[in-house]
Image (spheres, grey):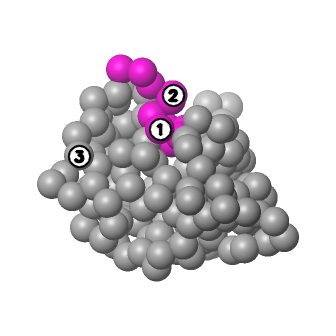
């Protein structure tokens, strides 16, 4: 009886591992929101890591987070590293930026797991506002594929992105308008 039970457990484990091996090697999470502000008003809130962290949902998850900025905090080369019991350990670096349209970042996680992902913020004029898209994509090793069977990355991270975009909208209420907004 015990031998049969062990064989069933072993077979289930083999099937689970085989299934994980067939899963995609990459992931992609994207959320977007319409924000009633021009791209030139939103871009600085993303391209400047100090401004970014005023609405970053991960900063809000842990008031005790220990963060440190690099020598540059705005535009390509800007860095921010963090340590937190709640959101892990890692670093973000702005890799490239196209004024008022795109900011691309490299997101490196050290804990609770090691990963390097690409993040892209796209700003697209839409009606009397801007469509802001927040995209994260990366590669999945075998362990990550196995984890993705049990944890829905799109749902977990996607909710954080939705919260962040809502924070970005709210952040605009507390920042002064650009000169262009006053003229209109």
Callout 3: SS: strand
Please give the name of the residue rendered at 23% of the width and 46% of the height, measured from the top-left corner.
69
Relative to 15, does residue 52 appear above or below in the rendering?
above
Question: Percent x, y for residue 77?
Answer: 25, 67
Magenta segment, which residues? 54-64
> Which of the two discs, 2 and 1, sits closer to the camera?
1
Residue 48: in sight, yes or no? yes
Mark 3 burial class by Cα count in 10 Å: few <14, some 14-19, many 20+: some
First along the sequence among labels 3 and 2:
2
In the picture, residue 75 is in which quadrant? bottom left
Residues 114 and 180: in front is 180
First along the sequence among labels 2 and 1:
1
Residue 18: in sight, yes or no? no
61 magenta-colored: yes
Mark 1 burial class by Cα count in 10 Å: few <14, some 14-19, many 20+: some
Residue for badge 3? 69
**Relative horizontal placement of residue 11, taking residue 57 as reference (left or right):** right
In the picture, residue 123 is in which quadrant? bottom right
Callout 2: SS: helix
Residue for badge 2? 61
Query: Gap in Å between the C-alphas at discs 3 and 1?
Result: 14 Å
Callout 1: SS: loop
């Amino acid at each position: 009886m015990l031998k049969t039970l062990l064989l069933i457990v072993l077979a289930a484990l083999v099937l689970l591992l085989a299934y994980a091996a067939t899963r995609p090697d990459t992931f992609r999470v994207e959320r977007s929101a319409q924000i009633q502000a021009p791209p030139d008003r939103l871009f600085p809130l993303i391209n400047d890591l100090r401004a970014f962290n005023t609405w970053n949902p991960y900063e809000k998850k842990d008031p005790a987070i220990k963060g440190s900025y690099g020598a540059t905090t705005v535009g390509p080369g800007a860095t921010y590293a963090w340590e937190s019991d709640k959101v892990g350990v890692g670093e973000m670096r702005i890799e490239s930026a196209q004024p008022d349209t795109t900011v691309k970042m490299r997101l490196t996680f050290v804990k609770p797991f090691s990963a390097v992902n690409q993040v892209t913020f796209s700003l697209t004029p839409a009606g009397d506002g801007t469509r802001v898209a927040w995209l994260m994509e990366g590669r999945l090793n075998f362990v990550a594929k196995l984890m993705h069977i049990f944890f829905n990355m799109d749902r977990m991270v996607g909710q954080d992105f939705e919260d962040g975009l809502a924070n970005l909208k709210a952040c605009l209420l507390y920042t002064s308008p650009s000169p262009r907004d006053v003229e209109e």
